[in-house]
Image: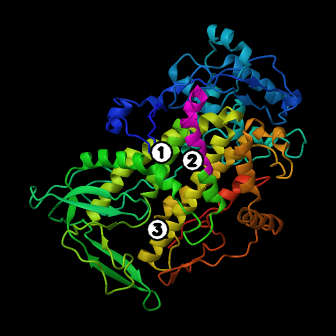
Amino acid sequence: MYTGSEHVGNGAIRVQGGRSYEQQAGISGSASWQQPVNYPSGKALEASGGECGHDMRDDSRASDEMDTVCDLDLPDDYPEATVERDETVPPSALKQEEVEEGEEVEEDEEDEEDEEEEGGGEEGEEGEEESFSSSLKQRRSALSPTHRKQTAETRKIKACTRCRSQKLRCETDPEDPTGECIGCKTVSKTSKKTIHRMPCFRGKITDAILFRSGGLQLTRRWKGTEMKDVGDRINPEDVRTISFTLGICAEPIKVDVVAFQAQPGDVTARFWMASDGEHGVRRKKDLAHYCLADIQKTATYFEAYVKRNALKVLNNERAGGKLYPQDIIEKTYAHIIHRYHGLTKKSATTGSDEIEIRFMENIFILWFAMRHSTGSSWICGEELLGMKPETKDETYPLFGRVSVPRMILAQFDSINYNRLLTKYGKLVLSELEAIMSRRISSRWFSVYAGLFILLREASWISEDRYRHARSNYGQRIRYSIPAFVESLHESCNNLLQHWHYFNWGSWPSPADPFGRHKTQMGNTPAVDYHVAVEAYADASVQRQLNVWRRYKEGNGRVDKPTPPKVDGTMYEGRQVHYDWDHPFYWVSQLFEENWQPHPTYQRERE
């Protein structure tokens, strides 16, 4: 985990002492990011009738602190949190909330976990923090049998965003257990006092699935993404070094490999679909039988490689293509990187700066690791392991190049998942959860930047799964690994649900330079604010938003986009109503007013 103090002049992210992930994090039972961290408190907002906007504040009392799992050791000058009490809740619900806050934590550990599952928390007034934290926390009576049963049910289905944020008991409707909770049903969706008009969504940001986890199914020697060396080596002393690339980084990946004896269940050839005939023809090209010489040594090297190159590759990212002018996605990425460099070059950084630096570094590393879970890699050095480039069959996905042997790819997929994706995915999502659950408005741009990158990457991954499906399955399914793409799209709605709860209200007009002070962006520096507003006003974003305006006005009717052709093959199934692969499909929803969850991909049933 970064301390925020190790920065290389050329913009690279330095590996700490060359240590492995386990050594660096000091993991024996649990990593440091798994320990709960209490953020400093800010003003708690209440209102008459259970509703309060930004102009109706009551600082009369401090509510209980909410524990959130986070990886950060926070400094004393961490930015103040701002919490909104937003919904018009009936008096009975408010009375229930007071009971929740004053009477209920259990004496045993299980019920303490139950309480966290039922709701989020509010922050007390900063001036009261010292006296509040110094006093002993009031012990609460044990849960009643009825509440214990309700808590157990809530832990299974999870509390909704609204109840968790306001620390309300999220009670299910006995007549509709899978529908809206009772609290969300009683909130007025038409009252002018209601700040959030959000659907009842059960889940946390940390539930989001951003990358696949089931392995490539290229061998039956191990299950899923286990990291293992391959036995049955033909000559262990004959170690060769190869260089390969995805074509996104100037520095190739260099690894030591050895030949092995293939077993039943090992995939040692590349298969693809050629667009011959009505349904296409499946073709095959045999590859050399090579595996990694030492998977643990390679894992340490690859983790350092990703950290060393993540920022440079993101800086060169051309989301709109090399032949086109820089689009708003690239401009946003450039500003995020510029902001990061500005923070690292400050003569004296605050604790808040250090936290943001670490968060940005984690985002950059996660992004580059996610890119290594997409695309096709090829050998780019002189050592080709006895193979020759394919120069006869132009339908071959890597025509004119030499594919990396399948077993090496299977092992690298396990390394990427275990050493990078899992670790940095948890770090990023935990930090987003912590910021948004506490409404820390001073970190508004950090949240915006993080979600912008993750949502753009979701479209990229969807596009890659579409390409892979055309190359391997022809016309019958839209995406390869359809269950993963389903979860990815549902996770995008999860992120957007929490974003719109955090960023409540309308976007200010780009023509009003002071409009942001009436919104959650009030504490955002002008230069960051203008980058976000430029994205909001961008023609590509507005075109995508217009699609959803017509969708709402037409009661769900939209013009069907034509699925693209990949190597002459086009998807011809039923999942053609929405362009989930469009670069702005998910990103544009950050700016959508009165947002509701959008339709997601549903796998084809054979």
How far apart are the two marked residues, 2 and 3, measured between alpha carbons?
33 Å
Residue placed at 49% from the left, 67% from the top?
464
- Dot 3, how many residues are within 10 Å of its Cα: few (below 14), some (14-19), or many (20+)? many
Q: Is residue 5 left or right of residue 330?
A: left
Percent position (x, y) of residue 2? 45, 34
Q: Is residue 164 magenta?
A: no
Residue 32: image x %, image y %? 44, 29
Q: Position of residue 13 (x, y in %)?
A: 44, 42
Residue range of the region highlighted in magenta in the rendering: 335-356
Question: In whole angstroms, how far apart are the C-alphas of marks 1 and 2?
Answer: 9 Å
> Mark 1 vs mark 2: which is more N-terminal?
1
Specify which label sits upstream in the sequence, 1 or 3. Answer: 1
The label on residue 480 is 3
Marks 1 and 2: CB-CB under 8 Å?
yes
Quadrant of the image occupied by residue 40:
top right
Q: Amino acid at mark 1?
A: Gly
Does dot 3 land on a helix, a strand or a loop? loop
